[in-house]
Image (cartoon, rainbow, N blue to C red):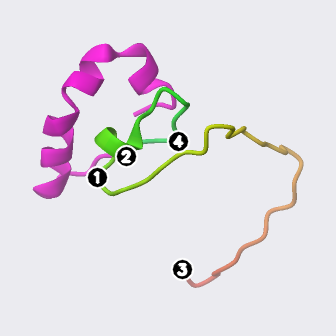
Amino acid sequence: MGTRAYAVRPDLAASNRRLLEYARSGGHLIVLYQTQEYTPETQAPYPASLPGDAQEVSEEDAPVTVLAPAH
């Protein structure tokens, strides 16, 4: 699911329990990072929180460091 999925699709939040049940029963569900509209307390499969002042930081020219080459 995309980065603003929960922000732009109210029906997604309403169906979130079904998505989590799907994942718990062996289904694969990939959720990209989310914006402040995302509520991990009710929408994530595990306890999580977002800081209220979270900011996205991107550096497109940053060097890439492979931390675990065998992974």
State how far apart marks 2 and 3 are (Cα): 20 Å
Q: Which residues are magenta?
A: 1-29
- Quarter of the view holding residue 7: top left
For label 3, count other residues whose C-alpha is less than 10 Å away and answer few (under 14), some (14-19) or many (20+): few
Figure quadrant of the N terminus:
top left
The kind of residue on which mark 2 rests is Ile
* First of labels 3, 1 by sequence position: 1
Q: SS class of the residue under badge 3?
A: loop
Which label sits on residue 33? Answer: 4
Left of 45 or right of it: where is 21?
A: left
Which residue corresponds to mark 1? 45
* Residue 32: percent from left, percent from top: 48, 41
Q: Amino acid at mark 3?
A: His
Front: mark 2 or 4: 4
The residue at which mark 2 appears reads as 30
Disc 2 vs disc 3: Cβ atoms closer than 8 Å? Answer: no
Image position of 9 with respect to 33: above or below: above
Q: Nearer the viewer, mark 2 or mark 1?
A: 1
Quadrant of the drawing holding the C terminus: bottom right
Q: Which mark is residue 71?
A: 3
Q: Residue at x 39, y 43 (%)?
A: 40
Please tell me which residue is depicted at 43% across the width and 53% down the height of the picture: 48
In-front residue for pair 7/52: 52
Separation of marks 2 and 1 at Cα, in angstroms: 12 Å
Between residue 37 and residue 9, name the one nearer to us: 37
